Amino acid sequence: MKDTALSSTHVALGAKMVPFAGYNMPVQYEGVNIEHQTVRDAVGVFDVSHMGEFLIEGPHALELIQKVSSNDASKLEVGKAQYSCLPNDDGGVVDDLIIYKVKEDTYLLVVNASNIEKDWNWISSKNDVGAEMRDLSEAYSLLAIQGPKAVEAMQSLTSYDLSAIKFYNFVIGDFAGIENVIISATGYTGSGGFEIYCKNSEVKQVWEKVFEAGANFGIKPIGLAARDTLRLEMGYCLYGNDIDDTTSPIEAGLGWVCKFNKDFTNSEALKAEKERSPERKLVAFKLDERGIPRHGYDIVDGNGNTIGNVTSGTMSPSLGIGIGMGYVPTVFSKVDSKIGIQVRKKRIPATVVKPPFYKG
């Protein structure tokens, strides 16, 4: 098990630590519901330093990125970021990721922790254009400072006007007494805030300064369990649950990051799938009665026939009802469609809804 630069800090704070993607990570501190509401109402800090970072640079950097990623990275300007995915050759997804344009001919790709080696090997296998690649994952830390009070709470730590950084934009500058920090208005919670990229040797100072600055704003450390409930309330996909090597970005509802004005891996097949409509789709659903849908539970039709399974599910801390996502035949995918979730021996009625579940 690898540790992040802050693992001992989490232990000292009383975090429950669990193995996740090869790392020793804090799953919770005070409890999922408390931590979840802290992010929805105030400001919370996640250590997500297990995420991977690749630097792609040189005159052929964009060419490689355009080939392996589904979104159109040519639209990126310096200081802007883009959500995208890496399609495989068989209709599935190698990973989803965020692409940052750091400067001309220099891009930072942020990938999921469990896929670092797989993604590196995949992108390298497609690099016949001579783009320069560097894996920075082991050297960099990442903090997600999320919540409606994040801007106000963190403003004293930087000379940049945080309120001026628009969603999916970033700056590189001073933060918490450290220079050349990436301050990115991104995150996976739906409650606003920033992601802070710095070197491992700097993150302890950043963490301490962040908590000093946020002391009057109710700041708390947040674990991975609340990160999961927060992203699920937004209907955001989690790699390994809702998308993987066997799910197409079209059926997963990620057609919006597939730009067919360019050629990319498997783009012809994905374009054809989009035009004919996929046989199944990822849907969001709410339970109509009390219960908790869990990953792997069967989704059934009115006659009790299994038509899919739950890819992500929880009791929504914000809404107080069971919510989830799962793949169903397209005929069941329309909003307000009635389905059932098999929770052990009980079939609980559910309704297909349009995400996000939480509208803050």
Image (spheres, rainbow, N blue to C red):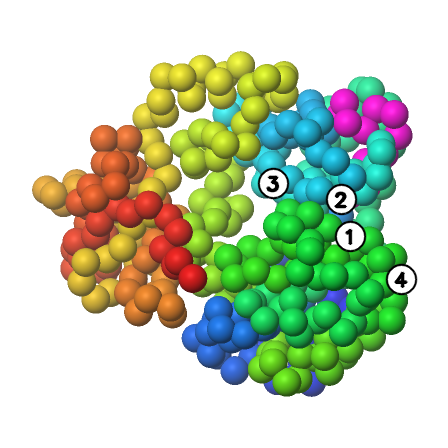
- Which residue does the image show at 73% across and 82% down from the upper left? 212
Residue pointed to by mark 1: 171
**Circles 3 and 2: CB distance less than 8 Å?**
no
- Identify the residue under disc 4: 179
From the image, tell me which residue sits under label 2: 79
Q: Quadrant of residue 129?
A: top right
Q: Nearer the viewer, residue 219 or 97?
A: 219
Q: Which residue is mark 3?
A: 83
Magenta residues (range): 54-64
Local crowd at mark 2 within 10 Å, few (<14), some, or many (≥20)? some
The residues bearing labels 3 and 4 have C-alpha atoms spaced at a distance of 26 Å
Q: Is residue 4 left or right of residue 148?
A: right
Q: Is residue 35 left or right of residue 124?
A: left
> Tag 2: residue type?
Gly
Q: Whole-Å distance between the Cαs marked 3 and 2?
A: 14 Å
- Closer to the chain start, of discs 1 and 3, is 3
Residue shown at the point (27%, 36%) measured from the top left? 333
The numbered mark, 1 or 4, whose residue comes first in the sequence reads 1
- Please tell me which residue lies in front, 118 or 87: 87
